[in-house]
């Protein structure tokens, strides 16, 4: 019997891509954060800090002990939450989470997946130590709470935790978890991917599954996490996106940040242009770059990290609103953020880059087949120049980049033909 999931969300895609050999070997992290359509998601800079003994920190619904030392973090934060959808820390660790649904009931209080992303980033100097932070907190505090402002959407979480040397997939249910070390590529979405190929698990997970009557295999058989725990009724909503990510990762000989950006803009048969449902009754699968039609949800923010390059300077490529109508810009961990990147709350704000790019996405949504290529012509050539500048070590100051992006956004709006929008 499946658990009841209040207002379930089926969205987000997270990837760890590895390609090349020797000095050309690259490891890249990518994440699309899909959220309620009008929920702003600004960037946040968290400085490194020392904390007095006995300090506590307030997560979304729980207050927990603070670490003695926390790392500098760049995170992407839904405006009303404490935690992050994805982020990068000063040690070069990147983390992103996904909603997954299991047969366990999700309580109204506990740690959100976004709390766990932030805790892992603030306290983990390597992928392995960040993984331990997440799993230890899951065992101690459990997961719970709503992930939607003024709503009730509860779920458990999967994570990709990665640095320049290794990565981990973590999948969870309540206080329990399994983790798999990943040396190559991996993708997660809103479904369970770990079966009996896990490397570590929470204490008592098999005994728990047997008590619930979910796992009745012989004692000699290794626990298959997916079989007893996954709520299979939710899998169909995300299978197409997960398979698209697996296809993207398979057999790649070369890989760069532009390749990951292209995938995060993917719309299946539309390429990097959203394909609308043009006749009643047509139900296209949810694409990697998500737009609202039958669901009040869309991609709110994206991040790409060249983990190999973070050995020199931890830097993330960040996009706000739908990436197909926006541009990725490079942001270094620890550098001051211009106000336009940080300002965003529950209502439209002309000072907020997120809201301005969201407004552009809404305009394009009226006729994406005609309008998306116009916007992309404005953004993507400039984005390619930024990538080349960063590769050559001559990246402009962040304030200059943000000012140029705002100018490009104004140019894109002015370029759209009014008859196509209205």
Image (cartoon, helix red, strand yellow):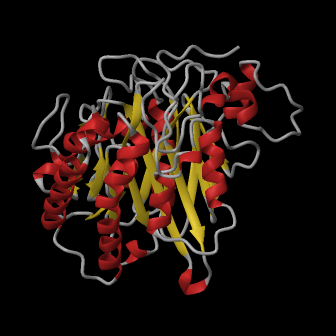
Q: Looking at this view, is 323 or 95 the one in front? A: 323
Q: Decide if residue 83 is on the left or right side of residue 179.
A: left
Q: Looking at this view, is 192 or 59 the one in front? A: 192
User: Splitting the image into 4 quarters, where does residue 150 fall?
Assistant: top left
Q: Decide if residue 176 is on the left or right side of residue 137.
A: right
Residue 118 in the image: state x and y as whole percent: 35, 46
Q: Decide if residue 167 is on the left or right side of residue 153.
A: right
Q: Looking at this view, is 352 or 217 the one in front? A: 352
Residue 16 in the image: state x and y as whole percent: 54, 59
**What quarter of the picture does the N terminus occupy?**
top right
User: Splitting the image into 4 quarters, where does residue 94 fall?
Assistant: bottom left
Say if 301 sits above or below 292 in the image. Answer: below
Task: State the residue at coordinates (68%, 52%).
Answer: 199
Which residue extends farthest front?
Answer: 419
Q: Quick check: can you spot residue 111? A: no
Say if 238 sits above or below 400 in the image. Answer: above
Residue 318 in the image: state x and y as whole percent: 32, 56
Task: State the residue at coordinates (18%, 38%).
Answer: 344
User: Splitting the image into 4 quarters, where does residue 253 fall?
Assistant: bottom right
Q: Quick check: can you spot residue 100? A: yes
**What quarter of the picture does the C terminus occupy?**
top left
Task: State the residue at coordinates (38%, 48%).
Answer: 372
Q: Decide if residue 176 is on the left or right side of residue 73.
A: right
Task: State the residue at coordinates (24%, 81%).
Answer: 394
Say if 336 sits above or below 35 in the image. Answer: below
Residue 124 in the image: state x and y as whole percent: 40, 57
How many discs mark residues in the rendered view?
Answer: 0
């Amino acid at each position: 019997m499946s658990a009841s999931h209040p207002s379930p969300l089926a969205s987000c895609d997270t990837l760890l891509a590895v390609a090349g050999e020797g000095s050309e070997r690259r490891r890249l992290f990518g994440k699309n954060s899909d959220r309620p359509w009008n929920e702003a998601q600004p960037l946040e800079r968290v400085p490194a800090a020392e904390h007095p003994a006995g300090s506590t920190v307030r997560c979304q619904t729980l207050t927990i002990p603070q670490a003695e030392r926390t790392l500098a973090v760049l995170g992407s934060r839904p405006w009303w939450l404490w935690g992050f959808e994805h982020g990068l820390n000063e040690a070069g660790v990147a983390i992103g989470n996904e909603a997954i649904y299991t047969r366990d009931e999700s309580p109204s209080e506990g740690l959100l997946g976004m709390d766990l992303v932030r805790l892992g980033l603030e306290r983990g100097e390597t992928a392995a130590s960040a993984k331990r932070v997440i799993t230890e907190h899951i065992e101690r505090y459990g997961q719970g709470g709503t992930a939607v402002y003024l709503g009730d959407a509860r779920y458990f979480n999967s994570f990709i935790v990665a640095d320049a040397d290794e990565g981990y997939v973590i999948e969870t249910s309540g206080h329990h978890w399994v983790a798999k070390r990943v040396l190559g590529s991996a993708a997660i979405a809103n479904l369970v991917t770990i079966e009996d190929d896990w490397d570590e698990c929470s204490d008592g997970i098999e005994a728990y599954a047997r008590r619930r009557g979910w796992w009745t295999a012989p004692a000699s058989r290794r626990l298959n996490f997916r079989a007893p725990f996954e709520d299979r009724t939710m899998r169909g909503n995300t299978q197409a996106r997960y398979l698209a990510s697996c296809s993207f990762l398979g057999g790649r000989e070369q890989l760069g940040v532009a390749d990951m950006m292209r995938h995060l803009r993917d719309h299946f048969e539309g390429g990097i242009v959203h394909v609308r449902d043009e006749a009643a009754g047509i139900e296209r699968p949810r694409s990697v770059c998500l737009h609202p039609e039958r669901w009040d949800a869309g991609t709110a923010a994206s991040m790409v990290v060249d983990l190999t390059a973070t050995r020199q300077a931890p830097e993330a490529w960040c996009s706000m609103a739908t990436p197909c109508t926006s541009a990725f810009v490079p942001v270094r961990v620890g550098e001051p953020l211009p106000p336009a990147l940080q300002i965003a709350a529950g209502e439209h704000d002309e000072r907020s880059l997120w809201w301005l790019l969201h407004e552009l996405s809404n305009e394009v949504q009226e006729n994406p087949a005609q309008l998306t290529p116009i916007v992309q012509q404005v953004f993507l050539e400039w984005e390619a120049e930024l990538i080349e500048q960063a590769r050559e070590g001559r990246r402009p100051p962040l304030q200059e980049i943000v000012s140029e992006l705002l100018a490009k956004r104004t140019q894109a709006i002015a370029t759209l033909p009014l008859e196509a929008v209205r």
